[in-house]
Each structure stands twice: as C-alpha cells, then as structure tokens.
Amino acid sequence: MAKARNGRNRRSDGVWDPLKNSSSDRKEAAVVPKTPQSESPSYRLAYADDDFMCREELRPVRLQLELLKTEMILTEKGIKSTIVMFGGARIPAPGAAAWAARNETQRRNLEAASVYYEEARKFARLCAEHAARYAHQEYVVMTGGGPGVMEAGNRGAAELDAPSIGLNIVLPHEQAPNPYVTPDLSFNFHYFAIRKMHFLMRAKAITIFPGGFGTLDEFFEAVTLIQTKRMAPIPLILFGEAFWRKIVNFDALAEFGTIAPDDLKLLNFVETAEQAWKIIADHYDH
C-alpha cells in the first residue's frame, strides 16, 4: 500500500485529512488532455467554474462566501476588535485639490472639509498607539478602503507601522484600495449587506465623519441596530456637529415622536481626534 507523503495529508490547520485536496484536484483538472468532452463547460469542477459560480441561482452561496472569506482571514490574522471609520471619499487631504467638486461652492466646501481628513488621520494614529498594547489585535482601524476620510484612517495607522483593514466594494469609481491599507487585510466585496456586517461584527466604536449617501447609509444602519438593541451600545461618534445637525435634524425626529428623546443620547458629537478617543477610553475604562 502506498504511504502518504510527509505533510500531504495535513490541512493548513494541522488536522489530519486522508481525503484528496481540492486545490490539487483543480491543478490536475487543468492539465487533462483537451478533448470535446474535457473542454465542455459541464466538465469543469463546480468550485473552479467562474461562470457557474456567477449564476443567479448561486447567489446564496456567494453571500456565504463573502461573509466567510473575510471572517476566516481576520480570525487567522488574530484581529479581535476594530475601530470603524466611516466618512466621505470626496474629502481631500489638506492642500490637495477637491477632485470631486463640480462648481466653486463645492470646491470651497470640500477643501474646507480637509480638516476632517487631518482629524481622521490623527484619530487613526491614536487608535494605532493603543492597539500596540494589544499586539495590534484589538482596536484595529477599519475603513471602507477608498480615498478621502477612508484613506486618512489607513494612512494614520500606517504612519505608526500598524496594520489596518480596508473593506472595498466594486463601484464605478474607487475601484482600487488606497495605498495605506495593509495588503493582506485588504478585501473587496460585491454585496453591500455583507460588507456592512463585517464593519460591525468586531466594532468597539464607530466614528462617522462628514460624507454622502454611503456614509449616511452606514451611520443609520449602525444607529438603528444600537437603538433596537440588536447590537451592543458601543460609542457612536460623529465628527463635525455643525455638519451633522444641518444634514439631519435629530431634534425634530424626537420632537415629532418618530424616535424617543433618549435615542439622542446614542450620539456623541466631537470636533477633534482627542475628544473622540476620550469617549472610547472612558467607555472601556482605559
């Protein structure tokens, strides 16, 4: 009887597995003689068949894969908790041009908003300094992986040689992750819903900087989950009180009765990175 080669039947986690490895089968299937039968789409291994995996009937499988891949990698990297940073992709770094501006008013607004890029960068540095006490397994910066405020968050962590996570999504713009995301913690998504789950699954705090529809979507999902007690009451911190009170009339919602007055206590408004970190530190008694 042929003996198993040393290590051949050990999985990556060290568990003994006498069954044939799917990766090796995929490689062997790729070099079979080319015949009408072997070149037929029906002959492809199901898990290695991109066309099959993209069929509408496979949507539940793709949803599961997007949830599982990121979860497995974060677990393997030892990431236990995160600090999430939401914010506008169109906010430039100080001194940089407002590339998204379509008129002079937008240019002035976006360039003035560069103060939030800088505060996001400073805040991420504070997170990274604290994360170092936990071997960068706790309080790890997590952003949407794109430009603007997201870039500032990953940049601040990178400046202290700290890892940071980027959760990109396939869009007409922002196709590539910003260069400050830790490469092996850079993820790409098709489904917004699964991406938002990963933002929240390890979050110890959520910070929201000025932004557009995407930022509003992320903010309202988080605050709804906390309001309805579907999520622990972690710090929810909004940078730029004047911006947020102009965009969303929170007090009017409470006055009308569509939210409870106590729901307003879920919101923490700050202007600086230091103020934001103090809220987190006080919440967790650091």
Image (tube, helix red, strand yellow):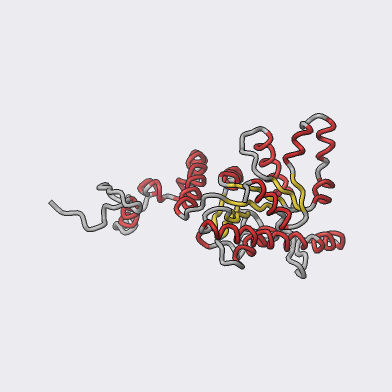
Give the tally of numbered discs. 0
For residue 5, which quarter of the picture? bottom left
Where residue 147 sits: x, y (%)? 67, 61
Residue at figure coordinates x 84%, y 30% from the top left? 256
Q: Which residue reaches farthest front?
A: 285
* Viewer-side residue, 59 vs 189: 189
Is 218 on the left-hand or right-hand side of 39? right
Where is residue 132 shown, x and y percent of the image? Answer: 55, 60
Name the residue: 67% across, 40% down: 221
**Picture coordinates of residue 116, whole percent (x, y):** 75, 59
Give the x, y percent position of residue 75.
Answer: 47, 50
Residue 51 relative to residue 275: left or right: left
Residue for point 60% across, 45% down? 200
- On screen, 160 above or below 82? below
Task: Kindly identify the residue that appears in the image at 51 percent across and 45 percent down.
Answer: 67
| Left or right placement of residue 283 versus residue 271 in this view | left
The image quadrant of residue 110 is: bottom right
Q: In the displayed orientation, state which residue is furthest to the top.
A: 257
Name the one closer to the observer, 15 or 263: 263
